[in-house]
Amino acid sequence: MALDEAARKLSAIPLFANLEPSRLKLLAFTSDRLSFADGEEVCHQGDPADSAYFLESGAVDIVIGEGEERIKVAELHAGDLFGEMALFLHSGRSATVIAHGDLTVMKIDGDMFLKIVTENPEAALGVMKALSEKIVATSEKVAAARKG
Amino acid sequence: MESNIFRYIWRFSKRQQLVLLVVTLFSFPFLYYTLDLPKVIVNEAIGGRDFPKNLFGIELGQISYLLSLCGLFLLLVLINGGFKLWINIYRGVMGERMLRRLRFILIDRVLRFPLRQFRKISQGELIAMIISEVEPLGGYIGEAVSLPIFQGGTLLTILVFIMIQDPFLGLAAIALYPVQMVLIPKLQIRVNQLAKQRVRTARRLSDRIGEAVSGIQEIHVNDTSAFELANISRWLGRIFDIRYELYKRKYFIKFLNNFIAQLTPFFFYSLGGVLVINQKLSFGALVAVIAAYKDLSPPWKELLRHYQTAMDAKIKYEQLIDQFQVEDLLPKELQKNPPATMPVIEGDFEAAHVTVEDDSGFPTLDGVTVKIPLRGSTAVLGASDSGREDLMRLIVRLINASKGLVRLGGHNLETLHEAVIGRYTAYVDHSAYVFNGTIADNLLYGLKHHPVRSADYDDEARIAHEHFRAEARLAGNTTDDIADDWVEYSALGFADKASASAHIHDILRLVELEEDIHEFGLQARLDPNRQPATADKLLLARKKLSAVLQQPECRQLVEPFDRKKYNNNLSVGENIVMGRPLDGDTDFATICNHDHMRAVLEKNGMTRWFVETGLKVADTMVELFADLPPGHEFFDRYSFIEAADLPDFQAIIRKAESAGIDELEDEEKTRLQALTFMLIPARHRLDFVTDGIRNKLLRCRESFAADLPGSLRKIIAFYDRDHYNPAASVRDNILFGKVEHGRANAREKIGQIIRKVISDLGLHEVITELGYDQQVGVAGSRLSPVLRQKLCLARALVKQPRLLVLINPLSSLDPDTQDRMARRILERFSDQALIWVINRPALAMHFSYVLVMKDGRVVESGSPPELLKKGQLFHDMVPEQS
């Protein structure tokens, strides 16, 4: 069943690793499954953030800046989660996300996302772990940049 | 207003009361003969001799004499009954008319109350007074004159009858009346006081209930429901205590009356018995008198009851009108019968040494002397306690000056008819009210001064309407018909609605309301029978849109309705029906539950699939939602099953697992099937609808439509590419399909395409006008605060006032929009007069004249450049760069 499949995919994300399968299914059930064509914007830098995205298939480019100053900073692939940081921080989108080829995302409603994550102690651990990993990764990047 | 209910009755129902009186008097001879005839029948017909006897000149034998008299008796009974019937109905009608008149008078006064009165008296109290307190007065008014006459007359008739039989026993029968007549009024005094208290307390209770309703948000967010309930309980308790006391006293009076009434027979039996035994009185006479006394007692009781009712009504009336006797009531002649020619208002608004005081006597305007030109724009600046708002209210006469003289365009403002002010000026402040009704009702509200064109009635309705008018006249109500066309387009210089339409659209664009109303129009339903031309145009729009959607970049945005194809963006139920219920009362589930639908599923071998799939859906819902607390918002937002029903479905699932699906009751199967009907394959990630199933569902669709019973045919409008669907919204009719759930931004893109198609076909204004019929809810509650403010401003602008007075009418809007709109309004009103209280001094530079207020006085006035030079306060307020 599609819902089982979606829940299985979500469970691979560290943030959700500790969540019960029924919670992941609920997340999948209450999310919109959206398809984007190549080059379409999934979200735009500076826009208010009301949802997180899980990339089910395809790839996206993460870019910063506008017009000529636009630079691509990363590329994400199927199985990646993005847009959740702005939800935690209640801030606008920190980057623009553009479809790299046709793709399908699971658009997780922001309130829903925060509710599931905060209502489940297991998820909180996952959040901490995911954030720690991001800090480590950033620190390593900074360290590498200094050396370089 | 009459200070006393008896005067009110006499003034407005004198003639009717007299008619009633005369008819009542006429009825007495018949009553007397009804009493007398039985005696004649017994003594002369049954026990008589010397037949034949003469009756009205005819010689009759004993039997025919008896039967003739009995026939006469029957006739008299009928005549008496007829009199009673007529009198009762006449009384009732008269009472109701007087009640209607009283309510009308009270409401008419409310509409003339000075504004500060509404701070003293709450909405709840007013409603309680006008609706419920007045109610019992109607009954009393009907019987005020006729009942005492009728019952008193009856009493007298019977008394005369008894007296003729035996004067001594007659006197005995009424011997105790004086006792009652002295005692009861004394006891009644305390009852009256209690009744007064009850009225006052009930009013306070309505006030509290009104407060609780108005302050419901505060009660929730402060968790004060217990406190409020305690408060209500206290008032309920007081009413109870008063009532309890009242009951005790009322029933004591009743007890006393009954006792005294029974005391008289006691004398009859004892004294009368002794007289009979001593052969001083005939046995027959005693029996007749005792029987007559039985008849004597009801009218006497009625008279006593009437006395109590009269006292009660007197108090209620006094307490009622006490609240409506208000000083400074707007004189009637300034609100009714507008002058035939409107006075010319030109020049300035002038106030000379004007003082306005609030309830506590504090002057909000303190000897203001000011002249404001009635041409060009005037900005009024000042702190919120500077008196700026009261000055504005003074200009449109919402309040009056307690001292000083106020003139508008050369006329004493206090003596101007409301028709002059209401047509010449418009006023909007931050608390402007939106009436429950449609957008159009509100937009055109400022043009409804009096009926301009009579409503069309067919013969039957005309008779009913004439009856309404005649009754309204009899009750002193207005005979103006609310069904007439009240909108005075001619006041704007337009012949009719059609020619005023451009003006209204213009205003809507000015206040940036047009897009919102257009959106309402897209959501509205259109009746193609009433607007066939528009429906045809919308069908054309459907065709055009469909052509646009064929283009490659749009192809995936919409899944069109096609009777031959399964639509993944519709629910399973909608796929079978391929239509919508016509009337708003029928919901879709009713159609899915119909016997015809069952037959269709059965015929196509789908019943079992529906149950099985429903079971799977239920299973999934239980898994997803079971451990959420009931009332969790996810149930409302996402679940197929309400929290309360979840345990039922858990039980059904268990039963199906253990005993098999065939063992389920019919009702359980139906509940499962209902879930399947709601499935939308493209939206819910529940892939139960396979290609094979889709084909079968298509066959169901065919057989559902094929032999549709008449009862369903009447309530379903099918999707048909060549016909307008009256059950679907305008947007859905143009779209003729469902926006793909899974296409990113499909909704926005489609919105743009639809907008383009609509404007290409010149349909924009037509659809906007459909949006005029959108209901706004109580106090405009269905609109956002921003829309409400825009609507109020639009209402003021639509009537093209010569003088527009505004107090921060756009406070809910963001600063940029406020600026944009302010400039547009200034531009539009460059030839008329605009007086505007603004919060941001920088805006004042765009006005031709500026007033600066402080502490209830105008401290600076002049053109902005002048004031920048000489005005200290204004200079300090306006930022340097301006």
Image (cartoon, coloured by chain):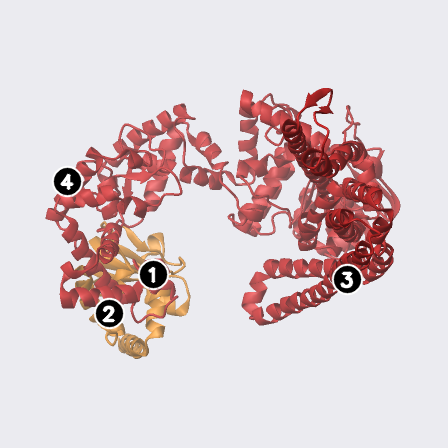
Chain colours: A orange, B red
- Left or right, residue B413 beside residue B742: right
Tell me the kind of residue under disc 1: Glu
Identify the disc placed on residue B642: 1
Q: Secondary structure at mark 1?
A: loop
Tell me the kind of residue under disc 2: Ser
Q: Secondary structure at mark 4?
A: helix
For mark 1, name the chain. Answer: B
In depth, the one of B31 and B190 nearer the eye is: B31
The tag earlier along the polypeptide, 3 or 4, is 3
Front label number (3 vs 2): 3
Front label number (4 vs 2): 4
Residue B372 falls in which quadrant of the image? top right
In depth, the one of B545 and B154 nearer the eye is: B154
In depth, the one of B855 and B427 nearer the eye is: B427
Q: Is residue B119 visible?
A: yes
Q: Secondary structure at mark 2?
A: helix
Residue A37, image x, y percentages? 23, 49
List the residue tagged with mark 4: B699
List the residue tagged with mark 2: A22
Identify the disc placed on residue B256: 3
For mark 3, name the chain. Answer: B
Q: The C terminus of chain A lies in which quarter of the figure? A: bottom left
In depth, the one of B777 and B716 nearer the eye is: B716
Tell me the kind of residue under disc 4: Arg
